[in-house]
Amino acid sequence: MRFFEFEARRIVEQAGIPVTSYGFCTTPDEAREAAAEIGGPTVVKSQVLTGGRMKAGGVKFADTPDEAAAHAEEILKLEINGHMPRGVLVDPKAEVKQEYYAGVVWDGTAKKPLMLFSDMGGIDIEQVAEEHPDHVGRGHISNLDPVFDFQAKEVIAATGVTGSQLNRATPILARLAELFRDGDMLLAEINPLAELTDGRFVALDAHMEMEDEATGRQAELLREKLGIAEDDTRDTYVPSEFERRVKAIDAADHRGVIQGKDHNFDGNLGLVIGAGGGSLTLTDAVRSQGGKPANYSEIGGNPSVAKACGLAKEVLQKDGVEKIAVMMSIVSNTRVDIVARGVIKACLELGRDPSEAIAVFRIPGAWEDEGARILDHYGVEYYDRSVSLWDAAGRAVEKVQGAS
Amino acid sequence: MSDAASAGDSIFIEIEMSDAVASDPELATKLQEVCPVSIFKATDSGPEIVVSQLDECVLCELCVEAAPQGGIEIIKKYG
Amino acid sequence: MSVLLTPETTFIVQGITGREAVNLTRECLDYGSRVVGGVTPGRKGREVHGVPVFDTVGQAVEHHGSQIDGSVVTVPPAFTKDAVIEALDNGIKLVVIVTERIPRGDVAEMVEYADRQGARIIGPNCLGLIAPGICKMGGIGGPAKDAEKAYEPGVVGVMSRSGGMTTEISSTLTAAGLGVSTAISIGGDAIIGSTYAELMPFFEADEQTEAIVIYSEPGGRMEAQLAEWVRENDSRLPIVAFMAGKFMDDEEMQGMSFGHAGTIVEGKEDSATEKIARLEEAGIRVVERIDEIPEAVREGVSK
Ligand code: SF4
């Protein structure tokens, strides 16, 4: 789950990291008030969950409260990369002496959070890491022990930073590491972390992302401290009609799991496939042999007949679909006969002859003999484990191409 | 045999109950309990087959075991 | 011999009274595995297929009368960390975590804890491991007779990020007459207890194993880590890799399941194409099809 800048700053602030006295506003009047309170020049920043807002005109400087209000009015109406802003942030225009970067991410190899620091802030850390590796300091923290300030100090000192700058930045990076761990974050970065002309360090912009799996146990932070509503999931992905319908079928019944995706798929071969690894392998096998999948799907966890039927029906009814291929890697939990019933039922309910609509049925494993009997009754050829995933996909491609 | 089920429109599975089973309210409760996919509904006059659920039958035979020998038969319409 | 498991391996099932755990227990017992107890808090005194159920891991160990080797953990995500640490504190050295959707921080904590105790975690989000003819620990391969059909004892060590594909690949090896020494479903999460590279030394030390087959997917640095391991260690084992998810490389597919966090640390090594290149650079044979694996293994072994 991604956070808006104003929320990320609140998170940072609550962790004891200094920020400028910003105001989050949803109307031009609020922006005027906020700017008046700040006094002096301000920056008005669009609050969107996408990058590139500077380029798009989502960040503007104002000398007076009226100017801030005018900018806010414009920015509130400005769509950036298909996103409308949640509001604007009015921030004092800081007198910056130097910009730094402070971040914490997961290192999957070490299986520990990794602190990152750079004295080249304000730009993408990935770019700094590539072009100026000596300007990036790194250091792991334990998942079990407390975060010690000296660990942050070592990371910062590695970039050559010393003096009062080192002493001011150290607790900031250490607190950021703590909040990363305590808040189940996938990413916590302050960029830029600014050293002001008066020597103070403040977080000028912050990015945070929380792991979706943890949003349940982080309810206190999300609901009480940030006031984020439960249904405000921040999904930036807009599901297609097909995807929404498959999701609804899946939710209607707790037995088994089905998933369907058709983002960027528009072929003539419908895929009713599973499970996780099998689906990836089969989608590749279809495409490598010149086939055009109409969708991606996953069946797993022994779904009910109704669920398998629902998925197959949705796939069969997709625009351009001529036939479906029903294929899985060897199953031990999901039952072959139950899936067979589901897909045949789907064909019959749509008035299709299963032997014509089902290009291939290749699911070896649990209850395969029973499955084969059902398929045989409807004239659908059954492929067991002696037909490889690759060959099954190839035959499906052949059949659908022969049909068109 | 009662034809309570055969009037349904299931595709794959049919269940036949003997008259004794079909009119046994006590057994009905038991069948409703054992069937993992809710194919039996207990009524005051005996078990009723929920036709819309028939095709979900997982062939576990728990119902067959719960009933007196030969009282319930699972019929696979696919031969 | 085999890897991590022996005919004497004893294990418990934590969360044994759950629906999937009951099946898994039955399957393991039928296969001949020594399931010596189960734990579900509040259910002490029950039995699951003859296996006694306890409230705590400590009670299970006490009842068994000596050290228990392993645990299969099937409890819900919110309780997994506690269950795993309970097992580790009771001297268990091999923990298979079946549970999915555990927050990453919890996984990392459990793994670090296990490291300190000299214990090993397999998973989470995995089906466990099997040494054909010796022991099956977890749902891997399904019911005993299905597992026997797909997994025959042999010379190939299998490691897979997909539980189902572990069986598909092993079945292919079995059909080709090569068989499997030990197959490990290592789990599909971003952070897992044991990666390919971390398990390699075990296979290396196992006389029965003559080759390794891995199943890989996009995301993470696990394949790059294996490539590094191969370069740094003069392994006697030829490795054959299969990489799924090449279609995700397409420009228009990007961003669909990749987060920002991983890409900073891991550079641009996440995609299938990049991973294939990295594996091949290290001398690992990458095949395009599962059915090419047996031939590639034979060629590797005869070199
Ligand atoms: S066999 Fe099992 S699933 Fe089928 S009706 Fe009987 S109890 Fe229900």
Image: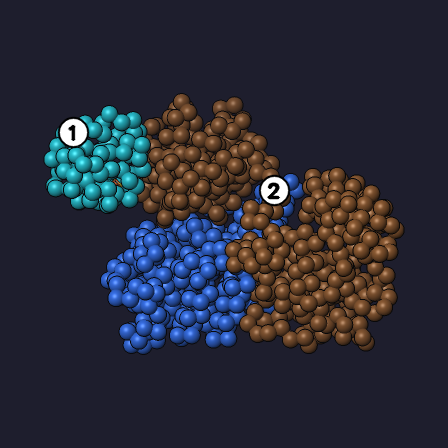
Label 2 within 8 A of ligand 1 by Cβ = no
Residue at x 53% of width, y 37% of height = A243
Residue A338, quarter of the rendered image: top left
Any mark on residue B2, and which?
A: 1
Q: How many labels does the image show?
A: 2
What chain is the brown one?
A
Relative to C99, A121 lies left or right = right
Q: What residue type is labelled 1?
A: Ser
State the SS at label 2.
Answer: loop
Q: How far apart are marks 1 and 2 (CA)?
A: 54 Å
What chain is the cyan one?
B
Confirm whether residue A130 shows in the render.
no
Dot 1: chain letter? B
Any mark on residue A237, and which?
A: 2
Confirm whether residue C120 shows in the render.
yes
State the SS at label 1.
Answer: loop
What chain is the blue one?
C
Q: Nearer the viewer, residue C192 or C237?
A: C192
Residue at x 71% of width, y 72% of height = A171
Label 1 within 8 A of ligand 1 by Cβ = no
Q: Where is residue B41 in the image (x, y as percent from the top left)?
A: 24, 37
